[in-house]
Image: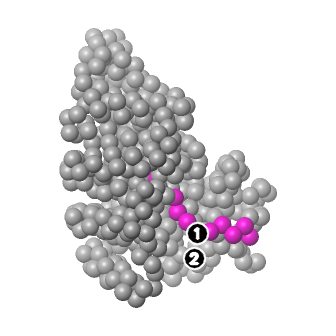
Amino acid sequence: MAASLLLPSPFFNNCGISKGCLHHIQSGYFHKGLTFFSGCLPKKNSSIFMVPVRAFALCCYASRTFASVGSLDTDVAGRESHVSNSNNFQTSVTSFQHSSDKLDGMKDFERELQELFDEVKMMIMMGNQNDAIDLLQANYEAVKERMNAGVRGIEEAATIDIIALGYMAIGDVKFVNALLDMLNEVVDSLKDDEPLLDSVLVHMGSMYSTLGKFEKSMSAYRRAIGNMEHIYGDANEAISLYRKALQVITTSNYMALDDSIMEKMRIDLAELLHAVGRGKEGRELLEQCLMITEKYKGKEDPSSATHLINLATSHSRSKNYVEAERLLRTSLEIMGRTVGPDDQSITFPMLHLAVTLYHLKRDEEAEQLALEALHIREKAFGKDSLPVAEALDCLVSIQTRLKKDDEELLEQLTRVLSIQEREFGPEGEEVMITLKKVVFYLDKLGRKNEIFPLQKRLSALGMKFKQRIQH
């Protein structure tokens, strides 16, 4: 029997929220995406337990390399613009909806998962974040109780997965870390042919990437890809089928060329091509997206900026930084005219361009862009926010090569460390990385008495991290 999800009263189920998606993507320092899903009405015989809260919604982060149109909109949760790389979450929801034939009752469970997405989405969209937390916490307590009773199946894994995505959207990164540890315990005990497992693994990879835990991210992705290849064949066959599907839809005029679903399909295929090392083919699809948008919406349409950034990301991965710079500057010009020069969403391409210029050894220009992005984020999110820490970390890397004052660099790193400790917890991998930088500058400044306690802490963190990877 599939597990039941806790949901509130279906107060908003008739509000007619339309289908759509909002992705926020970044490269280098930032890997996170944001996706919204449409609602579906619960049936009267639903096995969902009702929770006495007001109304809900769901928005969930999933890491992506490329984004669909809408990526550069302001974050709904209003917390982080740190984002971007891996599989689209809406694709995963489709997988949730169609992959459950092996277990009786799983279709009902999948429907409940969808309803949970929808409820939390609407809650966040309407600014009722506390109610969203209440809903997520209610489901957390329910699944925790089942796990304490020894029940650890795919239903528990999928439920924890959704709860973690919900908290990621809200911005409670510290609790997401704990949920991922909990999810790992369940996933490690599951067989590879479990329905929904691939979707859960992809989401785990996305969240780990978002949190900067790239080894764990790659581990989750490898298992997901291995499972998919075992079931569906090698990646090249999937690419061939995808191309044929796009060709059939195009030649049959079933959808308009500029249809958002068609666009999403091209971007998903482009991402797959990049993942298997066929970046040139992937770029051709991304260029096609850009040309279609410019033809039907005009070159000044804000959605063009998304495609320009996608292309810049692709060129950066191929170390073609000159072309990446050109594309990013164009996207910045478009965004400057549409969202304005001080909107926080513009800081993503701004920092992306700073990193690109750094690779081109144009450090002074890179520094100015990083400083500008930092000031915008401080104003938008507050001086002690995670997006600010990310901009600071980028700035320190640039200023290190510019041989700026070591005391100032240490002060900035200490500020980054303080934010990371609060957001990720004192044992986060991000904290460990920044601690190493702090120790380096303390040693450089001759402050030996401050180094020893930090080295002891680093040693302990290194052992814990090693043990977690082995587990």
Kind of residue sitting beneath label 1: Lys
Q: Is residue 361 left or right of residue 193?
A: left
Q: Is residue 457 above or below residue 311?
A: above
* Residue position for label 2: 106
Foreground mark, 1 or 2, reads 1
Q: Main secondary structure of the magenta part?
A: loop
Q: Is residue 335 left or right of residue 13?
A: left
Percent x, y for residue 112? 64, 70
Q: Say which element carries label 2.
A: helix
Q: Is residue 242 above or below residue 156?
A: below
Q: Residue at x 30, y 17 (%)?
A: 406
* Residue position for label 1: 19
Q: Residues within 10 Å of mark 2 (few under 14, many from 20)?
A: many
Percent x, y for residue 4? 66, 68
Q: Residues within 10 Å of mark 1 (few under 14, many from 20)?
A: few
Percent x, y for residue 90? 49, 67
* Magenta stretch in the rendered image: 14-24
The answer to which of 167 and 222 lies nearer the viewer is 167
Q: Is residue 235 above or below residue 399?
A: below
Disc 1/disc 2 C-alpha distance (Å): 24 Å
Percent x, y for residue 67? 41, 59
